Image (cartoon, rainbow, N blue to C red):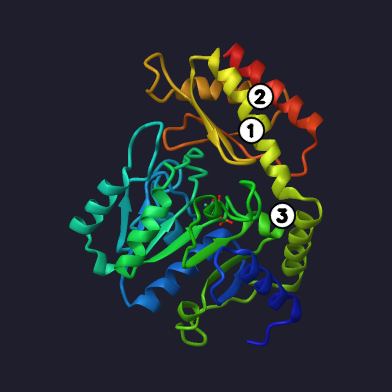
Amino acid sequence: MTPYASYVEVCERLNELTPGSHEKRSFLVNSGAEAVENAVKVARYATGRPGIVAFDHGFHGRTLLALTLTGKVHPYKQGFGPFVPEIHRAPYSDPFRETGRLGDTITMLETTVGAESIAAVLVEPIAGEGGVVVPEPGWLAGLADWCREQGILLIADEVQTGFGRTGAWFACEHEGVVPDLITTAKSLGGGLPIGGITGRAEIMNAVHSGGLGGTFGGNPVACAAALAAIRTIESKGLLARARAIGETMLRRLRRLSAGAPAIGNVRGRGAMVGIEFVGGDGIAPDRETTGRVLRRCHQDGLMVLGAGTYGNVIRLLPPLVISDGLLDEGLGILERAVTAS
Ligand SMILES: Cc1ncc(COP(=O)(O)O)c(C=O)c1O
């Protein structure tokens, strides 16, 4: 392949911006799902091991391998099997529900899979579609340590969390974690289809020529969009803006939750926030109230998304260029919808 200058430039920016000062290589694809597929291919090839660990609450896309890696059955997986072999599901840390303690996850993998059979652990630093689940502090770093000790590659799926969403270029940075491979898409292209796989040079270089690629991956239009998106994040100071948006959202929503027993938990990082709705016992997922709040928001002109393994989370991912006025207006609609529901 003879890449043009903009393709090389996007890869250089990815190598420079992603966590870690080691030598890196990147290549480009068309979507998040494709980025995940290719990271798994690289990890299996480089380690010679078959197993891939993915987590409950995880979402990795809708192609068959990405779907296999995704945790939630309805609506994503139902009817689309059989799925890809050698994918092992492990519990993800959920501090609100007190599940997925690191020690238990590791014991489970060591006893049911065997570390020597695992090529890679694939993890979202914050489980987005799974309900903006922010793992226990130290969980991701502990997982990374275990992977390193066992010769297992850590793949961070930053398709949703990457490129400023959480107030850093990548969410792994909040935990001081340097993954071996990292997948990017979504905000990288600012609306155009592009995804990236970035990894340690020796891992990426292991794959034979012709083993990875595709016709449209990193096409010139998508590369121009990615370069413009990165420049805009830098020139408009959007990492700081994501942190400020997050502070406003968390402050307002935590105040709201103090007077709204239906809200069990408000959590997030930067401009990525989840509101979890629960029943009278304070823990049982309340899908119905979530639905009522969502419908009311939509009626009043606020576009918000439902999420979560149990369908009881509202996920807020405002654009990083949102004005203070519009953010205030949106939060006002949401507050009224919660109070009325
Ligand atoms: C963490 C994560 N990985 C992968 C994907 C799949 O990306 P795409 O829809 O571009 O295939 C998504 C999409 O929501 C995602 O959130």
User: Mark 1: which secondary structure?
Assistant: loop
- Within the image, what quadrant is residue 109 found in? bottom left
Q: Residue 220 in the image: x percent, y percent?
A: 75, 73
Residue ID at (65%, 19%): 335
> Which numbered marker is on residue 297?
2
Give whichever of 123, 3 is nearer the camera: 123
> Is tag 2's residue or tag 1's residue first in the polypeptide sequence?
2
- Amino acid type of disc 1? Val
Ligand 1 is within 8 Å of the C-beta of the residue at disc 1? no
Give whichever of 242, 261 is nearer the camera: 242
- Within the image, what quadrant is residue 251 found in? top right
Task: Please identify the residue farthest to the left as the structure is shown.
Answer: 111
Mark yes or no: residue 71 visible: yes
Residue ID at (79%, 62%): 228
> Is tag 3's residue or tag 2's residue first in the polypeptide sequence?
3
Above or below, 307 relative to 38: above
Q: Residues within 10 Å of mark 3 (few under 14, many from 20)?
A: few
* 247 with respect to 325 (left or right): left
- Amino acid type of disc 3? Gly
Image quadrant holding the C terminus, namely top right
* 314 with respect to 194 (left or right): left
Mark yes or no: residue 63 visible: no
Q: Residue 84 in the image: x percent, y percent?
A: 35, 62
Q: Are marks 2 and 1 in contact (CB under 8 Å)?
A: yes
User: Mark 3: which secondary structure?
Assistant: loop
Residue with the mark numbered 3: 191
> Which numbered marker is on residue 304?
1
